[in-house]
Each structure stands twice: as C-alpha cells, then as structure tokens.
Amino acid sequence: MGRNHSKEMLQLRSERFVSAKSSDLKQMNLNPIYGYQHLHVRRLEEAVEGLDRLVPGLMTYVKKAKEDCNRSSSLLTHDESAAIYLYSMPIPFFSTLNATLRKKNRDALKPWFGYLKLFITALEKLPYVNTVVWRGVSGDIGSDFVDGSTETWWSVNSCSTDLNVVELYLGKTGTVFAIAVVNGKDISNYSTFKEEHEVVLLPGSALLIKSKPLSFEERLFIVHLEEKSGKSGQASNPCAAAGNQIRSDNSNEAQPLSYKESDFPLHHSLDLSSVRSEPWKVRSLHEFRSYNPLKIISTNDEILLLYGDKQFFLLNNNLETVSTLKNNILSSLEILDIAWSSLLCRFIAVTEKNAYIFDPKTCKLSCVENVQLRRKEKKFISCTCTGNTLFISTVNDNYPFHVDQYNLPDFTFFRQYTVSDLIEAKLNNKNVSKFIDDKRKISTIRANRGRLAVIMKIKYKHYLYVVNMTKEPFEAGMMPLPSSGYKINRIASTGEWLMVCDDYDNNITQISLDREFKTEYEAKKKYNYDKVKFALMFGPSSVVIVCGDNLEMYQV
C-alpha cells in the first residue's frame, strides 16, 4: 500500500514536468481565456468551491496547503501562497486543471475561474524570470514541432531550471524542451518541492521553435524554443517589464552576450592566504595514472573531474573517488580541454576534431554532431562555457587562430571571431595594436560570466587578454606574461581569476579585474620544491591545487 502510494506520488510529480504526448502541449483552442479576470480575489476555500466533485478529497488538500505553504512571504497573501502550494502538490489537482484548460469547450473551465483568479493573481506578483528552463515529453516528437513555427500552450506548464529534474522524471528516452523564457514565474519558494526549481509558464504562452529535434547522448532529443515577449494569451500580464526582450531572430548578426554590467559587480573578495598553511586534504596522483601525467582538471563545484591516462576520474569534495570512466571511445581520444556547462549539467570536452558531452551522473560520453570545424580551421584547441554560450578556440595549421561561439543548449553555431575581432576593437594598452598580422597564437580561453580570458603568444612574448563580450564593440584589457606555461581558471562568484605557471615559477596568481580592466596580481604561495601545475576553485570555499605528484585541497 505504502509503496504503491509513493509510486503514485512520483508519477503525479513527474506529470508536472513531463507530458505523455506532444499534443498535450500543442495549441488546442484559438480563443484566449476570458471571464475570470474581473472576479474578486477570494479565500482559497471559496475559490475552489464546486471543484471537489472533480478532485476527490480537495478540501483536505486545501487545508494542508494553507498549513504548509510559505506564510512568511512579503509578496503574497496567505491564500495566494497556498494556491501555488496546492498547484504543486502531488495530487490530481493540477492535471485536472490543465486538461480543462486544453478543452475546446471553454464553458468547462468556468468552475475553475475562482481558483484561476487567485492563482494567476499570485503568479503575477512574483518577479519575471528571464532564463533557460526545461520541460519534457515522453518519446520522440518527430515532426510535431516545425522549425520556425510558433506554438501556443494553453495549459499551466511547469518547467525546471535544472535539467536533472526533468531527466529524472523523463526516464531513459524522450524529448526535452530547452525554453528561453522571458515571462516565467519562479515558484520554488512556494512549491511543495523546492528542490525541483520550478518555473511556471502561464496559459497562452507563445513559443517560437528555434531548432529541429537534436539528438542528445543518443537517448534524448532536445528542441530549442524561445518565448515571445509580451503578454500571455490569457490577457492577464499587466506587470510585464518593458525591458524583458528576447534575442533577435536574426542569428547571423553579431550581438553581445545577454549579460548586464550590473549583473556581476567585480570585486576583490577571495583571500588565498590560507594556501600558505597545510592543505585540508591531500591525495597522491599516482593513484590516477600509470605512465602518463595528469593532463586536465575541471569541476562543477560538486564533482572534480581529472583526465589522464585516457581515463576520467570523478572525485567528491573529500577527494574520494566517486567513479571512473575508461572505455573504447575514451581510449581512442586525446582530449585537449574540458569545460562545465551549468545549463546542460554536463562537461563539454574537445579533441582536435570533435566535441563531446560527458554526464558525470551516468558516466556517459557522447559526440556532439553540431560542433564541427569550419572554414580555415583544422583543429580545436580549447573550450569554455558561460551561461548559454560555448566558446571553442581553433587553428588552421599553425595560424590563423579563431574563437567560435555556439549557442546552447542546441549547439547552434553563432559566429567565428578572429583575433582582431576580440582584442583590437578597444584596447586599454594601445601599444599592442601594432600586431596586426595573424600569427598570434591562442593557447587557452576561459569564460567568466561576460568576460573571456585569452592567453596568447604574440611573436616571442605572451599576454593575458580579458575581453568584455557584453560590450559592442568589445573591450579588452591586457597584461604581459613572463612565459608560455600559464594556465588560468575562473572564480565565478567574484569575477576573479586564478593563474599558475608550470614552467617558470611556483606562484599562484590571483587576478582581479575592475570595471576599467586594470589588472593586478599577487603571489599567494611559494613552493620550494614541487611545481604548481593547476589551481582552481572547487565549491564556494575550497581551492584545489596540483602540486608535484599531489592533489591538495585548501579551505579559503
């Protein structure tokens, strides 16, 4: 009995994020929803009167919603908060509402008007969300959604900002929608299950299909959609912010990334002084290799990914091995760089010819067909992710070098940048603009929110450029480097960078960039014997350093 009840609850939770068939989402009624807008907002018990015949035991659920909902909100009344909580409960309430919203007979919706008035009034008080959210459909949708067409969804659609939530409910196969929303409502603080990171699309949301279904990890399909700006079809969005505009449909024009300067004030907040003390955790690298050295280290703040000896090693925040991957695919590859995509919840790795997705939860590695070498490109060099953007640096023989920009989640190619595009539009140091040939070599790129750090060799000298990709034209700050062995990683929470050099000295260099892109760096530790080969942030308060033959973790 208990097991069956738990299974039923899980099924009901999954139905909020995953539709059984695509027709559940497609347009079923061309008429907007009218009739409830001018009603008075009533208490939840009064708003659901008459619905108990459609949802057995409804008043018991209403009582629980009012007891357990977020009652400390300064935005919503007690009844408004309870209305959202009721919607998110694992009961047939939300599914019955949505089935009614999709009916062609609008008269069937009248008993729901009281609840709709209370529920949508509550949602309208919440801030608009402008981000990418996920929703699923069981199975392959095939040609149900045509590239370039617009769909109107008349039900209340739950999505999650976390792809893992939708994947959990979707199962082994299916289709996931990656939706760039502008009018979404984040209800996670009012939901029964806060960990689902739920965002609601209101009835009448118009969505533009931006791509055909893309095969993802050979088991899922991804369809990229964009919510059209403006009011939803239910004619009930008077608070829409004038500044919430989606990207232009003309993807061939160069555009700055979708960040604002105010989104990430840069400040010097990380203190690495504790690195001078003994490490908190130490692990020998000999456990992860036989003859070949460790080549790459990356992290998603929860898992540390090591690459060496043609294997992946995944470690937790205690430096304990969680899992390893060594298979025929990985053994045949020579991975050059790895980046974490918070949007896809996966690592992206590049070889000379291809890009791959690695899921740390399933340890599955799959090729990304959309990422290909382009004209004047013969091999990939480095990769980095920020938000919904993937950057990959490339080279044609020895030169010239380029940086390709792809839009996630569907890996749509956006633009190819030359070195001149990145660093010569507006340089703080005018003296370096004399290098106008194309023999400038990019060794590493790292993105940190709206910035792109590029380590570059110009003739016989090496430089670090930090390019502000949010400006049009771009702005770049530059500092010289004493040698070629520098590696750089971001500190995402502060807008700073960590840099080490494994062929010149043993310093850990901390770089802080202010709005004028002045740079400063300070050595935090000198090692007497072993060289520092890698340094990166791991979670909110740890720095991981590869020093000699050891992997060391410090609390900062």
Image (spheres, grey):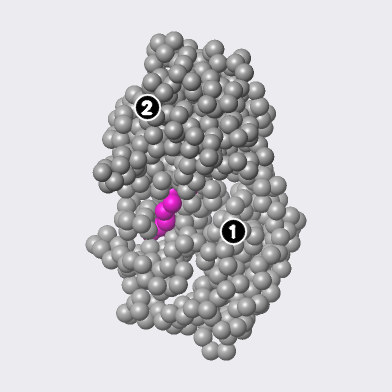
Does the magenta-highlighted stretch encompass residue 349?
yes
**Amino acid under disc 2:** Pro
Q: Residue at x 37, y 58 (%)?
A: 360
Dot 1, how many residues are within 10 Å of its Cα: few (below 14), some (14-19), or many (20+)?
some
Give the image quarter of residue 486: bottom right
Q: Earlier in the sequence, mark 1 or mark 2?
A: 2
Left or right, 255 with respect to 178, comes to right
Residue marked by disc 2: 56
**Closest to the observer: 476 or 368?**
368
Circle on res. 10: none
Q: Residue furthest left?
A: 328
User: Is 13 drawn above or below residue 92 in the view shown?
Assistant: below
Give the image quarter of residue 289: bottom left
User: Is 18 drawn above or below residue 396 in the view shown?
Assistant: above
Q: Is residue 398 visible?
A: no
Q: Is residue 264 visible?
A: yes
Residue marked by disc 1: 492
Q: Residue at x 71, y 68 (%)?
A: 520
Q: Position of residue 237 (x, y in %)?
A: 61, 24
Left or right, 529 with respect to 28, comes to right
Q: Position of residue 49 (x, y in %)?
A: 48, 20
User: Is 54 drawn above or below residue 467 in the view shown?
Assistant: above
**Amino acid under disc 1:** Ala
Label 1 or label 2, whichever lies nearer to me, is 2
Does the magenta-highlighted stretch encompass residue 528?
no
**Closest to the observer: 190 or 246?**
190
Give the image quarter of residue 216: top left
Q: Position of residue 94 (x, y in %)?
A: 42, 29
Read off the magenta span.
Answer: 343-351
**Closest to the observer: 328 or 364?**
364
